[in-house]
Image (cartoon, coloured by chain):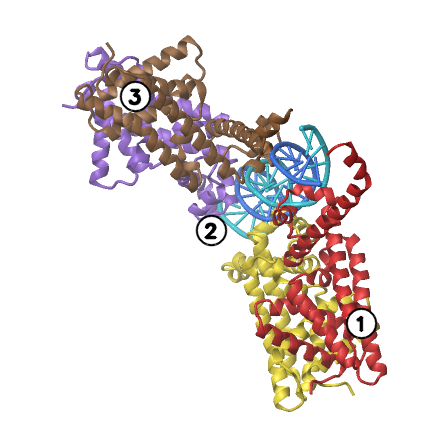
Chain colours: A red, B yellow, C purple, D brown, E blue, F cyan
Amino acid sequence: MGAQQAVDEARPVSARVQRKRGKRIQEIVTVAAELFGERGYDAVNLEDVAERLDVTKGSLYYYFSSKEELGTAAIQTLGDEWTDRLEKLLERADGSPAQRLRALIHEHVTIAVRDYPAALRVFLVPRNWPAAQRERIKELRTRHNQLFRDLIEEGIAAGEFTVTGVDTVLQCLHASMSQAPAWCAELSGRAQRAAIDELTDTLMMLVGVHPD
Amino acid sequence: MGAQQAVDEARPVSARVQRKRGKRIQEIVTVAAELFGERGYDAVNLEDVAERLDVTKGSLYYYFSSKEELGTAAIQTLGDEWTDRLEKLLERADGSPAQRLRALIHEHVTIAVRDYPAALRVFLVPRNWPAAQRERIKELRTRHNQLFRDLIEEGIAAGEFTVTGVDTVLQCLHASMSQAPAWCAELSGRAQRAAIDELTDTLMMLVGVHPD
Amino acid sequence: MGAQQAVDEARPVSARVQRKRGKRIQEIVTVAAELFGERGYDAVNLEDVAERLDVTKGSLYYYFSSKEELGTAAIQTLGDEWTDRLEKLLERADGSPAQRLRALIHEHVTIAVRDYPAALRVFLVPRNWPAAQRERIKELRTRHNQLFRDLIEEGIAAGEFTVTGVDTVLQCLHASMSQAPAWCAELSGRAQRAAIDELTDTLMMLVGVHPD
Amino acid sequence: MGAQQAVDEARPVSARVQRKRGKRIQEIVTVAAELFGERGYDAVNLEDVAERLDVTKGSLYYYFSSKEELGTAAIQTLGDEWTDRLEKLLERADGSPAQRLRALIHEHVTIAVRDYPAALRVFLVPRNWPAAQRERIKELRTRHNQLFRDLIEEGIAAGEFTVTGVDTVLQCLHASMSQAPAWCAELSGRAQRAAIDELTDTLMMLVGVHPD
DNA sequence: GATGAATGAGCCTTCATTCAT
DNA sequence: TATGAATGAAGGCTCATTCAT
């Protein structure tokens, strides 16, 4: 730990520290998102978040200047990750619009039920969030919705889908998918997979596609 | 204030007072249900409830012994009234299962959007409620569900409906209908009616019935 | 109920009413003293008092203008009655100072344990009472003490008693007798009588009188 | 702050902080015990405790999770310390049982009057305490009683003491000693010492020992 | 960076007291 | 007289936030 090292690390440390900080933030946000999803914004207190991270409440304020900001970050992170995964899926996916929509719905529900149990509620019930966050939530949802909207319109244009109104279908899709974790949480393994499949089939009917 | 009245009032206070008390309780419960619906259980404080009733916080405790009890009453009242209205509708309704289901959905959404703006969330997001209430919420929802379930099964038996699974359809129906107030709240008059109609049409597709 | 009666009862009613009022007050005071004794001044609320009397909280204010006043009345009534009984006993009693002191102690403890279970604490623990009452409590206690004091001094003069200081003996007597209900409450019948006898014997030793 | 200290402080904060925390807790408990003793459990509010410590009400909750817990700690601390001091006294004391009992009583009263003015009531009047604490109070009192009981029985065996019943004597002893602070509080210096001496002499008579 | 400690505002709840009827 | 209703001042408790170390 001589003077030389200090010089060597003048910048490198900063970079490493930066990475470390980013990682720490990610951990915090993930845990926070979990809790917010589980209990809702109001019911979560920073003590709980800190405890689950095995740090002190005060430490959180080193990374976030308020509960609200932590909330915003949680939403943002959650939403971005989610949308990224769906976008990646669509890049890989091929087949008819029906096949791709089915895959999209299936993936969406699977993520919700398996990877972020209860986190989706964050997007569904924005009323409890401070005004500042609601906007952000809306933005995220818009981006997220766009994936579904494009596909549905493609299907309509291709004559595969029949809908009364795209917006309405999107709302119903979202509402139903968001509730999925609540129904499937207690099921496990095979039963859960079956439930997700059935939900997917059912939701496809909203665009007039019946399972064979 | 003659003798006759005196006779009428054998135990006059008790009866009249009883009515009055019941009425007051109704007022309180209604206001409470509104607020709980708008903001969720946690975010509502009794100060707000009291203020909207133009009384003091302490007065509420003359009628309810705790916030939790007020919550329970709000849920109960809301749920009972709602289900009653739907049951009455079904008694009057005739026509094919499809026609009756359409009427039921339409009525349900109309109530939600028009008469109890935002109150449905109470049933949809029970996680924030104390354990005691969750049970009651479940009961109410079961009774409520039954109306839809019976009709759907009748439609299936009659060959009018096609579903992958009744339970799944019910869940999607409920989830979608419950979100309706959030979409339609800002619309007014004609636009709102149109939105409700379109939602009804869209949801009928969940049982395989397309609008003509 | 004509004019004549009204005249007839102009005073009589007043008198009867007066009696009735006095009786009502006695009932209230008795119940209040019970409760104050059982739980202590702070822990008693007027709701409880009213309930045990089967009236409304508000009604109590027709007879007493505050909780404090009710408290004062309870103490007063309790103390007067108690002292009266002891004074009556002494009028009847004869025999040596030792015999009479023994009788006095025995009666005192018996009243405490049997007739006013837990009410004595009112006098022993005046700290919880509002300042206004403490004076009254002291007065009562002085009068009450006098009975014991006179007898003890008589015994000393007669050479029957040996004490280091009369005041100190009085304090110890009082303290011990007041705690008696706490020890004897759960005992019943024979055992309770035995306990009271033994307590009496033990306390007589404070004036140097041993049981044979 | 050399290397050595660093070694000493392998987990330096933890240890020092631990000590500090313990000290703070002691301060709080002491103040609380004072107040509880002065006014009784019900009449004490945390605002007062906090004020006397020159902190905020909320701070108390950093150390104790409820008023009840603070109460328990106060009792425990008070009782333990008290009993410890008496036990230490007995270890040092020699002489006849009478001499030792006299010393024990004297010390007990002195502590009560001088070091814990009014705190003894906590043990004497447990009725106002939550059920949870009553048990603990009983335990402490049992341990405390044992000191006196052993000595008294020794004196009886040695033929020095005469009692009708050990338990009854213990009760009277306790009741009388506990009231002592109430009598001696306003006295000061010489008069107080005299009062304590006289009380000791008087109480010795309960076991049949007269002052010379 | 992290922690222990403290704060203060806010919420639920209790209760003595008042008052119109 | 008695009652139902309402009030307002506490009191216990929680929690986001701050800060010295």
Q: Which mark is residue C147?
A: 3
For disc 2, the marked residue is C1
Front residue of A80 and A120:
A80
Q: With respect to residue D169, does B94 lie above or below? A: below
In the rendering, at what x and y percent does residue F19 appear?
72, 32
Q: Residues within 10 Å of mark 3 (few under 14, many from 20)?
A: some
Q: Can the viewer see residue C119 in this picture? A: no
Quarter that holds the N terminus of chain B:
bottom right
Subunit of mark 3?
A: C
Q: Secondary structure at mark 1?
A: helix
- Which is nearer the N-term, disc 2 or disc 3? 2
Q: In front of the other: label 3 or label 1?
A: 1
In the rendering, at what x and y percent does residue D190 appear?
41, 8
Distance of label 3 from label 1 (alpha carbons): 102 Å
Q: Residues within 10 Å of mark 1 (few under 14, many from 20)?
A: few
For disc 1, the marked residue is A91
Subunit of mark 1?
A: A
Q: Looking at the image, do the residues carrying marks 1 and 2 touch, with CB atoms under 8 Å apart?
A: no
Q: Is residue D205 left or right of residue B119?
A: left
Mark 3 is on which residue type?
Leu
Front residue of A17 and D141:
A17
Q: Residue at x 20, y 24 (%)?
A: D163
Q: Residue at x 66, y 68 (%)?
A: A179
